[in-house]
Image (tube, rainbow, N blue to C red):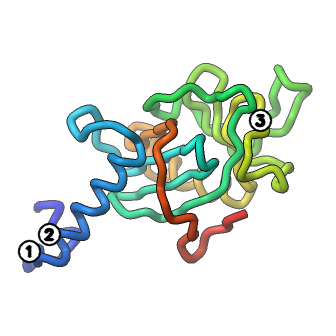
Amino acid sequence: MLAADVACGAGGPGMRCVLRMVAVVAAVFAFVGVAPADRAAADVVISINKSSQRMAVIVDGATRHNWSVSTGLGGGPPNGAYRPQRLERIWNSRKYNWAPMPYAIFFHKGYAIHGTPHVWRLGRRASHGCVRLHPANAATLFALVRSHGAGNTRIVVGHGGIRSARAPQGSVAR
């Protein structure tokens, strides 16, 4: 079965469907700043834009969520493409005074995506280097990564941009 059959129906892709698929793929590559040959396939792509302090969650090529985040005051986490290394539903930072890190998805050394009680700081740099999310969004992302698996999830950190700041239905965009 071809991807077009799944995305556009068993009758094959019409021109409108093909254009939509091309636009989604182009948007993802433009956002992450890499060429298609440089990127491994993943069911879930978590794109973190440090310039706009936004995260796009793309599932099977379609943007499912677009949320405000807070990344590091010092510029962290490092730009790059990663896979989740471990998931911790409840975690506290030993390095930063036992700060709570609910729904933590660790992806590079000590860097993680996690919920924060400091929701008023979302949308601007505020952390020691991790990617902070609204706790409800962190729980949603955690469940999504757990259900798809770490091997089918790619985390991309960079300065590329998604132009739309509108959140899809069902998202908590704070």
Asked if one can make out residue 163 in the rendered structure from this viewpoint, the answer is yes
Question: Residue 126 location, x and y as percent?
Answer: 79, 39
The amino acid type found where label 2 is placed reads Asp
Quadrant position of residue 81:
top left
Question: Residue 146 location, x and y as percent?
Answer: 52, 48
The amino acid type found where label 1 is placed reads Gly
Answer with mark 2 or mark 3, whichever residue precedes in sequence.
2
Give the Cα distance between marks 1 and 3.
Answer: 47 Å
Q: Which residue is mark 3?
A: 127
Q: Which residue is mark 2?
A: 5
- Residue 12, numbered circle: 1
Quadrant position of residue 102:
top right
Crowd band around label 2 with a 10 angstrom C-alpha radius: few (<14), some (14–19), many (20+) = few
Please tell me whether mark 2 sits on a helix, a strand or a loop. Answer: helix
Q: Disc 1 vs disc 2: Cβ atoms closer than 8 Å?
A: yes
Question: Residue 93 location, x and y as percent?
Answer: 81, 28
Answer with mark 1 or mark 3, whichever residue precedes in sequence.
1
Give the Cα distance between marks 1 and 2.
Answer: 5 Å
Judge left or right: residue 144 versus residue 62: right
The amino acid type found where label 3 is placed reads Ser
Please tell me whether mark 1 sits on a helix, a strand or a loop. Answer: loop
Question: Residue 138 location, x and y as percent?
Answer: 67, 52
